[in-house]
């Protein structure tokens, strides 16, 4: 069971530095035309060495909390999603907790680009089982640290950024139909390993993260299948009150176009901001939700489907009745 909750606050934190495709042209054998045509990406935000994933997480959580009007002392749970934390332990959520100086439960989720959807559903489920009235869900990613800037097949795709929401217990259930799933990644189509280092006793241990490796075509095939399947499943669950708007993980405009053609949805029903921010892994969905709300695309009363897919291979979705 998930608790009856609403999104009471939302915010984003994005590094100031916008890197254009033309700047990437100077690093690897690529063109603005190729990147735009194959992905829809024009720019991405890249954090400086001083801007860490943890800093972005604390900053975005603070802004979302301010917007929600919820007092920090009333937060009973923080769930963060990241693949980029500077620490193995403690969790990114514990850093956010430290920044707020509050006592509450805190934990991280690692579910690739589906991480925010997993975190949202985990938070709402724990709010039910632990009788918590308010929770923070944060996604913060600094993918530029794990990007091989000499590999044209991946470095054009990723960006840095963070998004957060405050969940508050409500009289009616504004978050419904949680769906989480995944398939084994037998071929290692999307991975980022830790580098091995020798120790005197146990041989090799993994201590440092290597670069992100992706077999683009294979991930594309998984992504479109998982996306379409999740959309259809959510639609069936909604019955006679279907969602009318969709915010998917922003991995590639082509993925969204492909799924749009395979379903009865129109282009205007999908929100996209990949052009500006590229793929920020689990942060794309809250960043897109915030932009959709700020731009007036997302309005009070809208029924919205969130759909994520990514490394694992994972996928997931949930339906939100927008109350802000
Ligand atoms: O967020 C997690 C989930 N991630 C995704 O969902 C990503 C899914 N995959 C994709 O979005 C696409 O597969 C990519 C955007 C990664 C790649 O696009 P593609 O249309 O599938 O290209 P491709 O990998 O099949 O490569 C086509 C050609 C190749 O050249 P040849 O072998 O045909 O001569 C590549 O070497 O394009 C070449 N290529 C590039 N050319 C210029 C690959 N990257 C680049 C590049 N610039 N940046």
Image: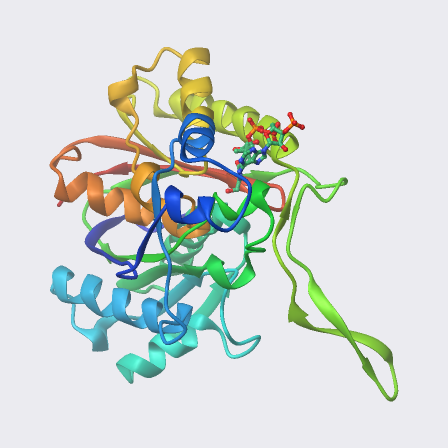
Compared across the picture, whether 107 is left or right of 174 comes to: right
Viewer-closest of 76 and 98 = 98
Percent coordinates x, y for residue 132 in the rendering:
32, 65
Q: Residue at x 35, y 57 (%)?
A: 161
Viewer-closest of 310 and 218 = 218
Q: How is the image coloured?
A: rainbow
Percent coordinates x, y for residue 126 in the rendering:
42, 59
Viewer-closest of 131 and 312 = 312
The residue most toward the front is 26
Q: Is residue 104 visible?
A: no
Which quadrant of the figure contains the C terminus?
A: top left
The residue most toward the bottom is 200
Q: Residue at x 39, y 42 (%)?
A: 21
Q: Residue at x 55, y 41 (%)?
A: 29
Percent coordinates x, y for residue 160 in the rendering:
39, 57
Percent coordinates x, y for residue 266 in the rendering:
30, 15
Q: Is residue 225 visible?
A: yes
Q: Determine which quarter of the picture holds residue 95.
A: bottom left
Compared across the picture, whether 208 is left or right of 228 comes to: right
Q: Is residue 109 above or below residue 37?
A: below
Q: Quadrant of ligand 1?
A: top right
Q: How many marks?
A: 0
Q: Is residue 92 above or below residue 294?
A: below
Compared across the picture, whether 128 is left or right of 73 comes to: right
Q: Is residue 268 above or below residue 101?
A: above
Q: Determine which quarter of the picture holds residue 205.
A: bottom right
């Amino acid at each position: 069971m998930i608790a009856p909750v609403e999104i009471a606050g939302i915010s984003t934190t994005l590094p100031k530095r916008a890197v254009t495709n033309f700047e990437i042209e100077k690093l690897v054998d690529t063109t603005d035309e190729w990147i735009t045509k194959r992905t829809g990406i024009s720019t991405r935000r890249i954090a400086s060495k001083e801007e860490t994933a943890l800093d972005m997480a604390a900053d975005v959580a603070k802004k979302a909390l301010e917007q929600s009007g919820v007092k920090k002392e009333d937060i009973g749970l923080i769930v963060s999603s990241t693949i980029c934390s500077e620490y193995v332990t403690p969790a990114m959520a514990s850093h956010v907790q430290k920044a707020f100086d509050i006592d509450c439960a805190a934990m991280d989720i690692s579910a690739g680009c589906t991480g925010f959807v997993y975190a949202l559903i985990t938070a709402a489920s724990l709010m039910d089982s632990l009788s918590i009235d308010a929770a923070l869900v944060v996604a913060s990613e600094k993918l530029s640290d794990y990007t091989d800037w000499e590999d044209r097949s991946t470095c054009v795709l990723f960006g840095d950024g963070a998004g957060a929401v405050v969940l508050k217990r409500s009289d009616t259930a504004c978050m419904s139909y949680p769906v989480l799933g995944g398939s084994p990644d037998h071929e290692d189509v999307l991975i980022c390993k830790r580098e091995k280092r020798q120790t005197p006793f146990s041989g090799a241990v993994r201590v440092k993260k290597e670069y992100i490796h992706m077999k683009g075509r294979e991930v594309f095939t998984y992504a479109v299948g998982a996306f379409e399947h999740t959309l259809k499943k959510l639609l069936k669950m909604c019955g006679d009150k279907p969602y009318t708007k969709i915010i998917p993980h922003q991995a590639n405009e082509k993925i969204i176009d492909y799924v749009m053609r395979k379903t009865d949805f129109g282009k205007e029903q999908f929100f996209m901001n990949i052009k500006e921010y590229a793929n920020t892994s689990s942060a794309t969905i809250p960043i897109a939700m915030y932009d959709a709300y700020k731009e007036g695309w997302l309005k009070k009363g809208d029924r919205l489907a969130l759909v994520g897919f990514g490394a694992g291979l994972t996928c997931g979705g949930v339906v939100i009745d927008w109350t802000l």
